Image: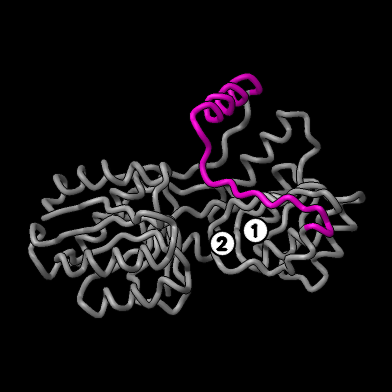
Amino acid sequence: MLRSISGLNTIAAAAIALSAWATAAQAADATKVALVPGGPHPYFAAWERAGQDAMKEFNLGAADYRVPQKWELSVQNSLLESLLSQGYNAFLVFPGDPVGSNSTVQELTENGAPVIATAGCLKEPTTASFCFGTDTGNSAYLGTKELIKAMGGKGAIVVDIDANKREAAEKAGALATVDGNAVDALEQLTKKAGEPIRAVIDLVGNAKTTQLGFDCLTKGGKLVIVGLFGGGAPWALPLIPIKAITIQGSYVGNLRETEELLDLVRAKKIAPIPVTPMPLAKANDALASLKEGRQIGRAILTP
């Protein structure tokens, strides 16, 4: 079973520690870790410093940040194969594609190099040791709900397949909730909205969630995709101009947007999302909590 765990900026350093653990059969100073994102992006910049810190902390032979020249799966795969030939024997990889990356990951692991999917997960079955990422769905909703309220909005209708998360959303003030797995999910959304739906924020980003988001939008609506689960766009291309839909990706903001966000949080005294600190020794408990849907908000592993 591929596992995921929630974390913040310490994710890369903690995952490198797990890479060292995964190669415990050899001396730590013989472990050469490569940190490989999907392409160039400031979101991953902290990995370089995390690699340097982890190399000292765990006495690794190397922990190097290596970036593909562009966001193409073939470019990332070629880089991974090249790094393997250069002697790197453990990999932290942001999968360029949750399905398409698996063949290269299998090649790496068959050559004795463990792979940890980092900041994004691979589709099972996979030979990756595990997934180390951020479960953003519920925590992102709770934060978004508070921001909508602060900006004078009415709130949001929440779609989630987990009953516990829907209950948490209702307690947090959601206008309504819908089970995304329900056969009549689209009809429920339309009925509970009571008016045309003009905007959807997709915090999962797979074929099923984007399809539902696209289908429920009225003409001229906007779909903002935040989640990175992966897969292909499921809608027919002619429907985009016919419905005059705007599809926008939102991955990470810039400094100005961050400053505006913090000013809004301070001015409106926005309630923080629930955060549960847990010692690193209880990582398995945190994983179980995520898997069983018991974790509300974020769980942060601390050394």
Q: Which residues are magenta?
A: 241-268
Left or right relative to 147: residue 217: right
- Label 1: how many residues lie within 10 Å, few (<14), some (14-19) or many (20+)? some
Indicate the position of residue 143 as horizontal and vertical percent values. Answer: 61, 40
Name the residue: 61% across, 65% down.
Answer: 206
- Label 2: how many residues lie within 10 Å, few (<14), some (14-19) or many (20+)? few
- Image height check: is 268 above or below 215? above
The secondary structure type at the circle numbered 2 is loop
Image quarter hosting the C terminus: top left
Q: By what rule are the colours in the image chosen?
A: one colour
- Front residue of 5/205: it is 205
Left or right relative to 131: residue 89: left
Name the residue: 51% across, 55% down.
Answer: 135
Q: Report if residue 194 lies within the magenta region.
A: no
Left or right relative to 144: residue 114: left
Name the residue: 92% across, 51% down.
Answer: 194
| Amino acid at pointer 1 | Asn
- Front residue of 102/18: it is 102
| Amino acid at pointer 2 | Gly
Q: Which residue is mark 2?
A: 293
Indicate the position of residue 86 as horizontal and vertical percent values. Answer: 15, 65
The secondary structure type at the circle numbered 1 is helix
Indicate the position of residue 219 as horizontal and vertical percent values. Answer: 86, 53
Name the residue: 20% across, 44% down.
Answer: 52
Question: Is residue 282 in view?
Answer: no
- Image height check: is 244 above or below 262? below
Q: Which residue is mark 1?
A: 164
Indicate the position of residue 236 as horizontal and vertical percent values. Answer: 74, 69
Which of the marked residues, 1 or 2, is nearer the chain's N terminus?
A: 1
Tag 1–tag 2 contact (CB < 8 Å):
yes
